[in-house]
Image (cartoon, grey):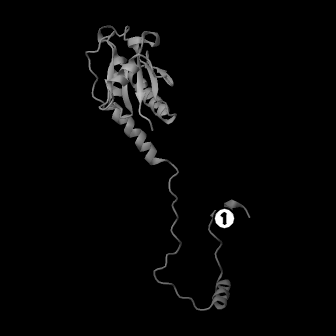
Amino acid sequence: MSRSSDKSDPPPVDDADSALFRDAVGPVKRVAGAPRRPPERRLPSARPRMREADEVAVVAELLDAPPPDPDIATGDDLVHRQTGVQLGVIRRLRRGHYRCDGEIDLHGMIVDVARRCLAEFLQDALDRGHRCIRVIHGKGLRSGHRGPILKTKVAGWLAQREEVLAYASARPVDGGTGALYVLLKKR
């Protein structure tokens, strides 16, 4: 039997066949309130909705960040620390005493791309258990009168992140004022 005939209406039943069937089955009563066919079972979605919502929230939080300090100049050193981070930690960070476990080079990128790349890099660094990373943002020498755009943006983004304990401009051999050493929390 072909599949196309399965979907078409069945042929009509003649009266003799119908009478024979009713005699064989006997009297029948309809069951009150019973559904004619069971409702379809809906399976849960295979999409990780909570993880997707978390990722969207992180990106939205980064996008809604207050503007960083516009008074940062090309050659300015950047330093930031969370409450509770000792000055000795900052001193060692600035001197390059912590081994950098990874680095990302953002200079030359547009702001939106740099923001997403930095967020993904930070998440990856945390997942890998990195404690210190280097972020190269550039000095903003090609930004003209606008000043160092990525430098100020990166400083603002990192200062807002809870997992960033501190950051400081790198030593000249590691990029100087065009890069940051970033100290991350332990997981």
Residue 110 seen in render: no
- At a point 27% along the width and 28% down the height, the residue shown is 66
Classify mark 1: helix, strand or loop: helix
Residue type, mark 1 in image: Asp
Quadrant in which residue 113 is drawn: top left
For label 1, the crowd category at 10 Å Cα-Cα, with few meaning under 14, some 14 to 19 and many 20 or more, is few
Rendered location of residue 5, percent (x, y): 68, 63
Quick check: 46 left or right of 90? Answer: right
Residue 54 seen in render: yes
Q: Nearer the viewer, residue 102 or 6?
A: 102
- At a point 34% along the width and 31% down the height, the residue shown is 63
Rendered location of residue 23, percent (x, y): 65, 91
Residue at the disc numbered 1: 6
- At a point 34% along the width and 16% down the height, the residue shown is 149
Quadrant in which the C terminus is drawn: top left
Rendered location of residue 90, percent (x, y): 36, 22
21 above or below 51?
A: below
Quadrant in which residue 143 is drawn: top left
Quadrant in which the N terminus is drawn: bottom right
Return the residue found at the far right.
1
Quadrant in which residue 70 is drawn: top left
